[in-house]
Image (cartoon, rainbow, N blue to C red):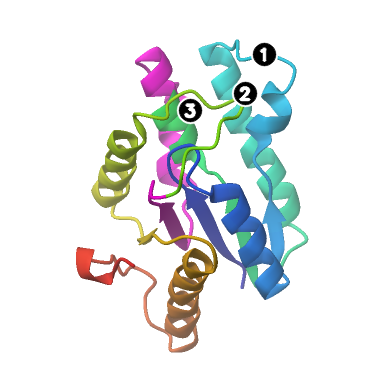
Amino acid sequence: MLKRIAITGPESTGKSQLAKELAAHYQANYVSEFAREYLGGKQGKYTIGDILAIAKGQLRTEEGIAAKASGLLFCDTDMLVTKIWSRFVFNECPEWIEEMFIEHRYDLYLLCYPDLDWEPDPLRKNPKDRLSLFEQYKMELQHAGFNFAVVKGRGAQRLKNALNFVRRLESNSRAGLPHRWLLGENDFF
């Protein structure tokens, strides 16, 4: 049975790299961030309608890859990213995104902590808001009761920490244990 793992969190926290590294480690499928492709030619100008189109495109791309996948599927972003970003930029979020955040669940959310250096990028805008955005991500995941872990560390240590959480998910699956294990602060690396 396919296990979906979302790599989520504020911008410039290593989501894309971590998703690629995890997929390579497990020789698993990977879903790239649709927003990069979509916003590439917009020169930083977009509307709330674009956010909705990005969310739908991300989900459509994920479903296309999931239909052919087995084992693990690593997703570089999820509905939570579009939900928080929409609220941050436009002070509102399309209802469809709100609904899909709850309906389209992952077996595990890896929430990337903003302990990496800010890397400038034409699509990034908030080097000073990453910690407050991180807290919003954490609060949303806790409130929804989703299975998540916070990934910290630099370089190889960040990947090692993420691998530990994925192994825990796999171990629980093999043992027939429920996937609903939320990690406390002491479990974060």
Instruction: Tell me where residue 72 appears, x and y as whole percent.
Output: 62, 68
In the image, which is nearer the foreground, mark 2 or mark 1? Answer: 2
Is the residue marked by circle 3 packed among few (<14), some (14-19), or many (20+) residues within 10 Å?
few
Q: CA distance from mark 3 to mark 2?
A: 27 Å
Q: Secondary structure at mark 3?
A: helix
Q: Name which residue lies at 47% across and 46% down.
A: 13
Amino acid carrying label 3: it is Trp
Q: Are marks 1 and 3 in contact (CB under 8 Å)?
A: no
Give the mark nearer the N terminus: 3 vs 2. 3
Q: Is residue 63 left or right of residue 89?
A: right
Q: Nearer the viewer, residue 99 or 86?
A: 86
Q: Secondary structure at mark 2?
A: loop
Q: Is residue 23 above or below residue 140?
A: below
Q: Are marks 2 and 1 in contact (CB under 8 Å)?
A: yes
What residue is pinned by disc 3? 96
Q: CA distance from mark 1 to mark 3?
A: 26 Å
Q: Nearer the viewer, residue 56 or 80?
A: 80
Q: Quadrant of the N terminus?
A: bottom right
Q: CA distance from mark 2 to mark 1?
A: 8 Å
Q: Nearer the viewer, residue 184 or 101?
A: 184
Residue 93 seen in the figure: no
Instruction: Tell me where residue 175 appears, x and y as whole percent.
Output: 43, 89
Q: Is residue 184 magenta?
A: no
Q: Name which residue lies at 64% across and 63% down.
A: 21
Q: Nearer the viewer, residue 152 or 185?
A: 152
Q: Name which residue lies at 67% across and 22% down.
A: 39
Q: Is residue 107 magenta?
A: yes
Q: Which residues are the magenta region? A: 86-115
Query: What mark, if any, has residue 122 been given in the picture?
Result: 2
